[in-house]
Image (tube, rainbow, N blue to C red):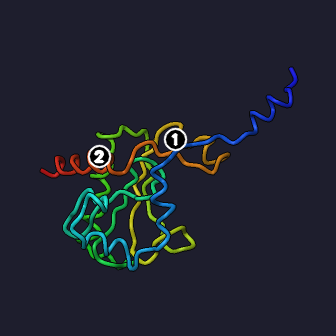
Amino acid sequence: MTETGKEKNAQERPRIIWAPWRIAYIKHTDKEPGCIFCRKPAEDNDAENYIVFRGETAFIMLNRYPYNNGHLLLAPYRHTGRLADLDAEESAELMRLLQLSQQVLEEEMSPQGFNIGMNLGRTAGAGIEDHLHFHVVPRWSGDTNFMPVCGQTKVVSEGLAETWSYLQAAFKRKMK
């Protein structure tokens, strides 16, 4: 069976994806000064900053530009870019928060796997290299498909405010 010119043209035509929530990111051209991992927990607006949990030496927040729904960032309050600079209390709490994050995400989002780690240094992929932070990314079968490969587009199917709302409540319940 041969394709007609019309059929071939229809297959090559770009598809339109509506993502009106992205306009806030597109229009946000002026970068806020300072370190987000220092500035955001110092503010008193966890919902706006997507902070889902505050510990003694570290905290958990949603990634504003996630790879997947539920993409969490865990960081110490203290500003440091070196893993070796963490004291024993910070190290222990970050490990507890990594475990807690995995448990909460499993219970609330039922992922089939996780990517958990950190990028240390610009060359290793750190977007914020002077304040270390862990990434906890829940994964599902099929969450990486043709969209990022062919369309340079990643689809995140839930708004951050909705995700924050139920994850923040779940962290609260877990810590009672």
Residue at the image point whose x is 35% and y is 40% from the top: 109
- Which amino acid lies under the numbered mark 1 shown in the image of this protein? Asp
Whichever of callouts 2 and 1 sits on the residue coming sooner in the sequence is 2
Residue 144 in the figure: left or right of residue 107: right
How far apart, in angstroms, are the residues tagged by discs 2 and 1? 20 Å
Residue at the image point whose x is 26% and y is 45% from the top: 166
Point out residue 6 in the picture as x, y percentages from the top left corner: 82, 30
Callout 2 touching callout 1 (CB < 8 Å): no
Disc 2 versus disc 1: nearer the observer: 1
**SS state under label 2:** helix
Picture quarter containing residue 42?
bottom left
The residue carrying mark 1 is 143
Point out residue 40 in the picture as x, y percentages from the top left corner: 30, 70
Residue 54 in the figure: left or right of residue 50: left
Nearer to the camera, 117 or 13: 13
The residue carrying mark 2 is 103
Residue at the image point whose x is 25% and y is 64% from the top: 93
Picture quarter containing residue 51?
bottom left
Point out residue 61 in the picture as x, y percentages from the top left corner: 32, 59
Q: Considering only vertical position in the picture, is 99 above or below 82?
A: above
- Which amino acid lies under the numbered mark 2 shown in the image of this protein? Gln
Q: Considering only vertical position in the picture, is 140 above or below 131?
A: above
Residue 27 in the figure: left or right of residue 62: right
Nearer to the camera, 109 or 51: 51
**SS state under label 1:** loop
Dot 2 surroundings within 10 Å: few (below 14), some, or many (20 or more)? Answer: some
Q: Tag on residue 28?
A: none
Point out residue 80 in the picture as x, y percentages from the top left corner: 36, 79
